[in-house]
């Protein structure tokens, strides 16, 4: 049964200057929530992602690190949120291979500090039943699938990268804070996102920007890896649905119902660019197969039955439509991505090991 509490009105969103967090912030403001965006502004952040709401009376920004318990205590006290949506994380698998420590510190220790601060706040407020700690996680915690099958919420955890292991650890902490202390949590595990404001080190923006630059388009291995792609604005919508209507203590998998091999994604993007930015040769001629990522999971796929049947939520954007919009957005927002391309590591091959 869905929880019948009134929807929380004041959200503390962590990681709201990142890719998905900023989509959540923009959508929540549009829906009338008041939002406090807590972000440390790491290399992956960009305040331009929330420029459209920066002057909105319902929006506030706090620059803070989720590993800093004293800063978190102050922010909870100052803003007294009704709910937390916890997205702040180190999120790039390739960087986790080269430098796993930051992933443990932010994703594990940072989540621990968030839980501690949220619990103290919830206690101080008299433990309101409508409070939520919504932990946003990934389907990568379930490991890799073969050619068939899908991840359900009961699939055993089997993370294969330092990134997914750190997210799995954080999921377990959230579960424990619910079981042990009664903190009203919900957890979501989502498949790969794409869309506007995607940081230019991730697959889809890399493909678009290399193609536009006339450079080789790197595809790991033979491009056979399969992901279940979800348009980021659909993810933000699903997250608010779970926050508002999800059962306390429950996990919801979120997927795009859009499985595709990496090579097919690359081909589709090249075909869109051939139409939108025609040149003498096909963009697909720039595709270059490169050494695979170590521990590269073959396939992820989400069984979306629970969120569909219990919360009535389904993705609204098809892969073809989402890619069309995304490519169009990058063509229209060159100043945004050019500024980010100068950040350390962007445009380089990371995570090869030895
Ligand atoms: N990108 C995906 O496809 C995907 C899929 C499923 C789940 N997720 C999860 O969604 C969340 C957001 O992912 P994203 O792709 O938007 O990430 P992102 O890297 O674009 O953004 C992360 C944000 O968190 C902030 N941050 C990082 N460390 C911090 C710290 N110590 N203190 C405070 N802020 C900090 C960064 O400054 C940045 O703004 C993550 O928890 C990720 O695991 C991502």
Image: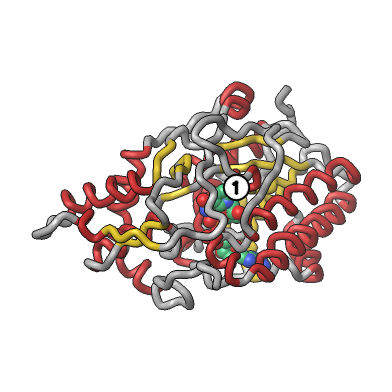
The answer as to whether callout 1 falls within 8 Å of ligand 1 is yes
Q: Is residue 318 above or below residue 340?
A: above
Query: Considering only vertical position in the picture, is 150 above or below 295?
Result: above
Residue name at image x 54 percent, y 49 percent: 297
At x 70%, y 43%, the residue is 157
Q: Can see residue 350?
A: yes
In this rendering, position of residue 99 left or right of residue 323 = right
Q: Please tell me in which quadrant of the rendered image residue 4 appears.
A: top right
Ligand 1 falls in quadrant = bottom right
- Give the x, y percent position of residue 68: 76, 70
Work out whether residue 209 or residue 185 is closer to the camera in this orientation and state it.
209
**Left or right of residue 263, residue 66 in this image:** right
Q: Which residue is mark 1?
A: 140
Task: Please tell me how many numbered marks the rendered image carries.
Answer: 1
Q: As rendered, which of 321 and 154 lies closer to the eye?
A: 154
215 or 1, which lies in front?
215
Judge by depth and name the residue closer to the eye, 189 or 29: 189
For mark 1, give the secondary structure. helix
Q: Residue at image x 31%, y 63%?
A: 209
Quadrant of the rendered structure where residue 188 is? top right
Regarding residue 57, the answer to whether it shows in the image is no
Residue 158, image x, y percentages: 68, 45
Q: Position of residue 349 (x, y in %)?
A: 44, 70
Residue 270 falls left or right of residue 231: left
């Amino acid at each position: 049964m869905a929880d019948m509490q009134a929807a929380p009105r004041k959200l503390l969103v962590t990681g709201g200057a990142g890719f998905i967090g900023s989509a959540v912030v923009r959508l929540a403001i549009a829906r009338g929530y008041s939002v406090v965006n807590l972000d440390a502004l790491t290399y992956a952040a960009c305040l331009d992602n929330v420029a459209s709401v920066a002057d909105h009376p319902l929006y506030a920004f706090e620059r803070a690190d989720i590993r800093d318990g004293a800063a978190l205590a102050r922010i909870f006290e100052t803003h007294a949120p009704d709910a937390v949506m916890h997205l702040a994380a180190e999120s790039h698998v390739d960087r986790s291979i080269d430098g796993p420590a930051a992933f443990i510190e932010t994703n594990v220790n940072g989540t621990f500090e968030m839980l501690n601060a949220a619990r103290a706040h919830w206690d101080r407020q008299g433990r309101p039943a409508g409070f939520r700690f919504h932990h946003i996680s990934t389907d990568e915690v379930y490991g890799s699938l073969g050619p068939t099958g899908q991840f359900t919420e009961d699939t055993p955890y089997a993370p294969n990268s330092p990134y997914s292991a750190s997210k799995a650890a954080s999921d377990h902490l959230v579960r424990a804070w619910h079981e042990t202390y009664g903190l009203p949590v919900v957890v979501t595990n989502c498949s790969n996102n794409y869309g506007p404001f995607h940081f230019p080190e991730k697959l889809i923006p890399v493909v678009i920007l290399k193609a536009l630059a006339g450079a080789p388009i790197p595809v790991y291995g033979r491009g056979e890896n399969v992901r279940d792609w979800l348009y980021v604005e659909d993810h933000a919508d699903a997250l608010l649905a779970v926050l508002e209507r999800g059962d306390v203590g429950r996990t919801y998998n979120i997927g795009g119902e859009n499985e595709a091999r990496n090579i097919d994604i690359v081909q589709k993007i090249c075909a869109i660019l051939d139409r939108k930015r025609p040149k003498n040769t096909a963009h697909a001629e720039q595709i270059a197969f490169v050494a695979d990522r170590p521990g590269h999971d073959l396939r992820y796929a989400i069984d979306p039955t629970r969120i569909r049947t219990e919360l009535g939520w389904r993705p609204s954007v098809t892969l073809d439509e989402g890619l069309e919009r995304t490519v169009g957005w990058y063509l229209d927002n060159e100043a945004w991505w050019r500024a980010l391309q100068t950040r350390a590591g962007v445009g380089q091959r990371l995570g090869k090991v030895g």
